[in-house]
Amino acid sequence: MRDLGYFDADSGPLDELIRLTDRKLDRAALDHASDVQKNVPIYDIGVLRPILADADRRRALMAEWAWVLGQGPGVLVLQAAYADTAPIDRATAAYETIIAREKASGATGADHFATAGANDRIWNSLQKLCLEDPETFALYFGNPVIDAVCEAWLGPFHQMTAQVNLVRPGGKAQSAHRDFHLGFQPADVAARFPAHVHALSAIMTLQGAIAHCDMPLDSGPTQLLPFSQQVPAGYMAYRRPEVAAYFRDHAVQLPLQKGDALFFNPALYHAAGDNVSSDINRMANLVQVSSAFGRAMEAVDRSAMCRALYPALLRLKAGGQIDAAAISAAIGAAAEGYAFPTNLDTDPPIGGLAPETQAALMVHALDEGWTAQAFEAALRAHAAKRAP
């Protein structure tokens, strides 16, 4: 019997993507949207603010947002999410100061789906804004609308992160992709996760973009393929040329105004667009919000475990007392095998979608027969790169 528990490089055929995305959103399915453009619901927050202040009506609105993000087109626009854009202007000024400072230091932020240096990116713009200007942080992130849409998809106690992206005139589009978690893994790694984890990945995070300026179409706002999050094997399929070509031909873009916010399911096929304007520096703060449940129950010092385990594995391997499969299992039990969270300023995804993991470092050291002292030094350097 064919094993249906895993996806491979050929999973998610193009005809499935066409069938799921070649349809029109029924406006009657939405109780609170003020408009639907190109299959994307638009919510006028100026009208909806009183609803967000009422517990029962707020819950009904959040339920609609969750349906849109999951079973609906997978994307929505919150029009005038910031009624007062003064906090955005203050945050923009702070971010421009940070960009100038980081460029002066020689830093160039590697990007996951675009050429490094083609734009200006601030990794961990959340923490950097808070430390640069705490009052502006409070006014900017103290936004009940943003909080409500995050809770709609993730529930309470979610964890906020953010990365500023500034694309200047001439900035090129990203390649079509899905986002964190599985979207940031190479295809061979994504294929190791069972199909039900592919479904789980899409409900563990929420992606958003807060517009820091007006974004007409020629400035290259995010390209979106509504309903594409519903392709079960999309974390494998988006990488194939015929799928990328279909995305290029059928993706939609919506102009945004300063203070608008775009939110979408991380499994939605999307990509930043080409900035073909002559004078628009397109700045967005890309928020990536995680479920509170994406954490282990116990706090474990995995660095200490690796330091203790490595000499033992070295001896056992040299004595022929342990085979490769057992070594892999032992490393998996002790070392951190996942690349995130990390400090992307000092531990960027060079040469791939994700930085080297603690487990991969340990495998590399064993393969090359490093001494315990050499491994411990490399382990310290690895930890230092990842520290915030």
Image (cartoon, grey):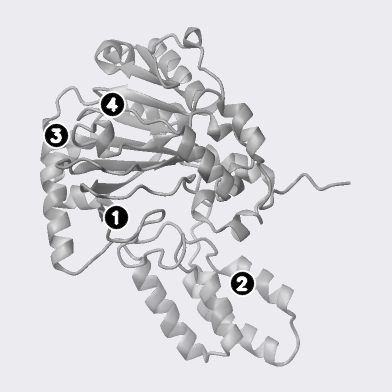
Q: Quadrant of the C terminus?
A: bottom left
Comparing 106 with 324, the one in front is: 106
Q: In 3D space, how far apart are the residues under numbered discs 2 and 1 (Cα atoms)?
A: 30 Å
Residue located 32% across and 42% down the image: 286
User: Between tags 1 and 4, which lies in front?
Assistant: 1
Q: Residue type at mark 3? A: Pro
Q: Residue type at mark 1? A: Trp
Look at mark 3 in the image and give the residue it sits on. 87
Give the side of residue 10 with respect to residue 30, left or right.
right
Q: Is residue 188 visible?
A: yes
Q: Is residue 157 visible?
A: no
Residue 126 vertical position relative to residue 246 in the rendered view, above or below: below
Residue located 11% across and 53% down the image: 97
Q: In 3D space, how far apart are the residues under numbered discs 3 and 1 (Cα atoms)?
A: 20 Å
How crowded pointer 4 is (Cα within 10 Å; few <14, some 14-19, many 20+) is rated as some
Give the side of residue 128 with respect to residue 78, left or right.
left
Q: In 3D space, how far apart are the residues under numbered discs 1 and 4 (Cα atoms)?
A: 24 Å
Give the mark nearest the N terminus, 3 or 4.
3
How crowded pointer 3 is (Cα within 10 Å; few <14, some 14-19, many 20+) is rated as many
Assign a secondary structure to mark 3.
Answer: helix
Give the mark nearest the N terminus, 2 or 1.
1
Look at mark 2 in the image and give the residue it sits on. 331
Look at mark 1 in the image and give the residue it sits on. 123
Give the mark nearest the N terminus, 2 or 3.
3
User: Between tags 3 and 4, which lies in front?
Assistant: 3
Mark identifier at residue 144:
4
Q: Residue type at mark 4? A: Pro
Residue 43 vertical position relative to residue 228 in the rendered view, above or below: above
